[in-house]
Image: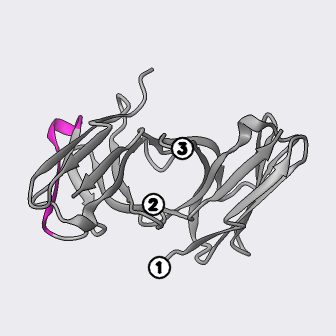
Amino acid sequence: EAGVTQFPSHSVIEKGQTVTLRCDPISGHDNLYWYRRVMGKEIKFLLHFVKESKQDESGMPNNRFLAERTGGTYSTLKVQPAELEDSGVYFCASSSGRWEQYFGPGTRLTVT
Amino acid sequence: KQEVTQIPAALSVPEGENLVLNCSFTDSAIYNLQWFRQDPGKGLTSLLLIQSSQREQTSGRLNASLDKSSGRSTLYIAASQPGDSATYLCAVLGGNNRLAFGKGNQVVVIP
């Protein structure tokens, strides 16, 4: 069984540019989560999808961040325009109900 | 707001010693607690999940205990090996269905 995959593994962009991160959850997992770790801080929740619906997006930092989950399958997280403080590692996780969350390898975003 | 603390932040132990990693959380209303391992530049690997109704879980050399009422969990790694060197993260799942993480315990096992 394939795990959670994320693309790209690393992205370097300039301030003001746009970046789109992609996450493919484990097949059959209705729950999909985005988390972020910025330098020196703990991993923090961004948002939660149940199928294609946003269940909770209270962790999104501001309206420069937009997440979608098309047809309840893969998800994208777009940052537009990117700022320096958006640098960090973005993790995606999926689960079946309130059970174990399985994490992807993360996307390291560097904004210069 | 749930806060998760992991102590110590970093530790080094000689190979063969038992490792004891501590995690505390402020809100005892949790569904479960997960321990993860993270290697440098890699993702999170789930090690153990303890449901709120359980007291402990075991997998091989790993044992995790949970005392929900006091807001504590401990991860024991028996007979540590150099390959156990990594960062260990504790995370609790609350009623809001999101994981709250600690900053991690960075472990180095010295051969």
Q: Secondary structure at mark 1?
A: loop
Q: Residue at the spot x=52%, y=62% of the render?
A: B101
Residue A48 spot, x, y in % from top left: 31, 55
Q: Per the image, is A78 magenta?
A: no
Q: Dot 3, crowdedness within 10 Å: few (<14), some or many (≥20)?
A: few
Q: Outermost residue, front direction?
A: A112
Quickly name the residue at label 2.
A43
Q: Chain of mark 2?
A: A
Q: Quadrant of the N terminus of chain A?
A: top left
Between the C-alphas of marks 2 and 3, the distance is 15 Å
Q: Residue at the spot x=41%, y=66% of the render?
A: B96
Q: Which of the two marks, 2 or 3, is nearer to us in this view?
A: 3
Q: Secondary structure at mark 2?
A: loop
Q: Which residues are magenta?
A: A63-74
Q: Amino acid at mark 1?
A: Lys
Q: Secondary structure at mark 3?
A: loop
Q: Per the image, is A64 magenta?
A: yes
Is residue B21 rendered to the left or right of residue B98? Answer: right
**Are discs 2 and 1 less than 8 Å apart at CB?**
no
Residue A88 spot, x, y in % from top left: 35, 57
Quickly name the residue at label 1.
B1
Between the C-alphas of marks 2 and 1, the distance is 15 Å
Quickly name the residue at label 3.
B40
Q: Residue at the spot x=75%, y=59% of the render?
A: B11
